[in-house]
Image: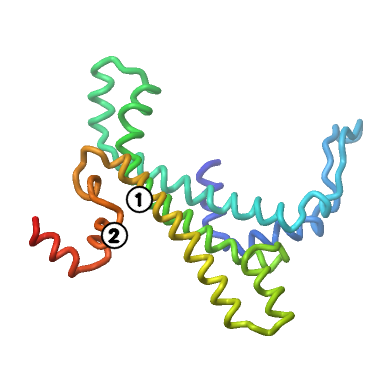
Amino acid sequence: MSFGYVWLFRSVPPLVQLLFWFQLASLYPTLSLSIPGVKTFASVDTAHLFTGLTAAFVGLTFDIAAFSAEIIRGGLISVDHGQTEAAKSLGLGRRRIFWRIVFPQAMPAIIPASGNMIIGIAKATSIVSVIAVQDLLYSVQLIYNQNYLIIPLLIVATIWYIVITTVLSIGQYYIERHFARGKGGDAGSGLWRSTWRRLSPLGRTELGGLA
């Protein structure tokens, strides 16, 4: 079942999922909880239940959950199996082995990919404007449809997206540093020093020379 879920929602584009949930009332006009042919306990119009905001929430959540599952699976299998065998030889239980041995070692592999995914989904929220959900882009569109200042307002939206992703990137950096303790690398470096080291070939050369 988990394989089927991941396969399905990784295969369907987010925009298609949003449109499906938004138009669910066309397929099922009414959703009800009942015993078929006996009694109906509760019933609700699907159009009232799945508003644009609800459809956006459900569609994006299902999509990101599928990718999150693969990120976590990749992080867990990156931990050498010998770690688990060694813990078992010490008499540790399965739950304790997972939370104290496997999971902490998997987090350095999980966090970067998860951070990138969260930043990606923050930008992907702009697609909910197609179902009239008033996100940042949709609000900008409403304004420039009135005053026709298209480019200036798109620049404003761009700046806000940059601010949001920058804040998320800073949070990702500190979480990575927390779980990278004892592994060296950038764990003890400052935020801007670490960023310069990662992004700039010249920065890597200079820092290597200083080392």
Q: Which residue is mark 1?
A: 173
Q: Which mark is residue 95?
A: none
Tags 2 and 1 touching, CB below 8 Å: yes
Q: Is residue 36 left or right of residue 88?
A: right
Instruction: Please identify the quarter of the rendering in which residue 156 is found.
Output: bottom right
Q: Quadrant of the C terminus?
A: bottom left
Residue at the spot x=20%, y=68% of the render? 201
Residue at the spot x=65%, y=72% of the render? 140
Residue type (three-letter) at the residue carrying disc 1: Tyr
Q: Position of residue 41 (x, y in %)?
A: 88, 32
Instruction: Please identify the quarter of the rendering in which residue 205 is found.
Output: bottom left
Q: Which residue is mark 2?
A: 195
Mark 1, residues whose alpha carbon is within 10 Å: few (<14), some, or many (≥20)? some
Counting residues from the start of the chain, the first of labels 2 and 1 encountered is 1
Secondary structure at badge 2 equals: helix
Q: Is residue 34 above or below residue 203?
A: above
- Residue furthest bottom in the image: 148
Secondary structure at badge 1 equals: helix
Q: Is residue 209 left or right of residue 7?
A: left
Q: Position of residue 85 (x, y in %)?
A: 25, 26
Residue type (three-letter) at the residue carrying disc 2: Thr
Q: Is residue 144 above or below residue 24?
A: below
Q: Is residue 49 above or below residue 105?
A: below
Q: Is residue 71 left or right of residue 142?
A: left
Residue at the spot x=33%, y=39% of the render? 106
Q: Quadrant of the N terminus?
A: top right
Residue at the spot x=27%, y=42% of the render? 180
- Foreground pick, 130 / 87: 130
